[in-house]
Image (cartoon, grey):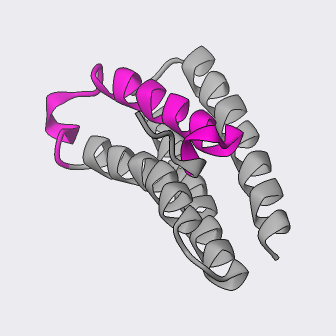
């Protein structure tokens, strides 16, 4: 089986872990948030990994960096949603802090990838 270049990136592998983590924690959110915050967080987190992957298929460094920028923005969107989730007591403080650590690692990896693309 062919392994694509994005699958080898630490940045994409971390994004995949962040996606799984987000899906797991949002399972416990209130039912009325299924089409609200839960949907928003899940779309944002999948967008992170998807844009990293799609960026690797682009030919120019400028195009690649653009997709990394979008992935970074989606990571910040996820952080915003996590903060609001904490404010609304949908998650415990421990979960919130764990999420912040994962997001911080993700943003550092994306920033490094983007720097290599510029």
Count the marks: 0
Left or right of 8 in this view: 37: left
Can residue 6 be spotted in the picture?
Answer: yes
Where residue 2 appears, as percent x and y from the top left, is 45, 40
Vertically, is 55 above or below 97? below
Range of residues picked out in magenta: 6-35
* Residue pictured at 64% horizontal, 22% vertical: 98
Vertically, is 61 above or below 9? below
Vertically, is 37 above or below 17? below
Q: Quadrant of the N terminus?
A: top left
Secondary structure character of the magenta stretch overall = helix
Is residue 85 within the magenta segment?
A: no
Left or right of 72 in this view: 108: right
Residue situated in front as seen by the camera: 75 or 50: 50
* Residue pictured at 55% horizontal, 41% vertical: 7
* Residue pictured at 60% horizontal, 30% vertical: 99
Which of the 4 image quarters holds residue 95? top right
Where residue 12 appears, as percent x and y from the top left, is 59, 43
* Residue pictured at 68% horizontal, 74% vertical: 65
Which of the 4 image quarters holds residue 116? bottom right
Q: Quadrant of the C terminus?
A: bottom right
Where residue 97 appears, as percent x and y from the top left, is 66, 25
Residue situated in front as seen by the camera: 63 or 101: 63
Left or right of 86 in this view: 98: right
Where residue 46 appears, as percent x and y from the top left, is 40, 48
Taking the view exactly as shown, the residue that stands out farthest to the front is 1
Can residue 89 be spotted in the picture?
Answer: no
Is residue 14 within the magenta segment?
A: yes
């Amino acid at each position: 089986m062919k392994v694509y270049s994005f699958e080898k990136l630490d940045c994409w592998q971390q994004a995949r872990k962040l996606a799984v983590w987000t899906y797991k924690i949002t399972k416990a959110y209130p039912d009325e948030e299924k089409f609200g915050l839960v949907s928003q967080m899940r779309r944002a987190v999948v967008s992170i990994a998807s844009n990293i992957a799609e960026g690797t298929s682009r030919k120019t460094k400028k195009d690649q960096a653009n997709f990394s920028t979008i992935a970074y923005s989606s990571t910040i969107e996820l952080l915003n949603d996590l903060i609001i989730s904490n404010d609304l007591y949908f998650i415990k403080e421990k979960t919130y802090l764990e999420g912040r650590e994962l997001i911080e690692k993700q943003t550092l990896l994306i920033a490094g990838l983007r720097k290599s693309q510029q």
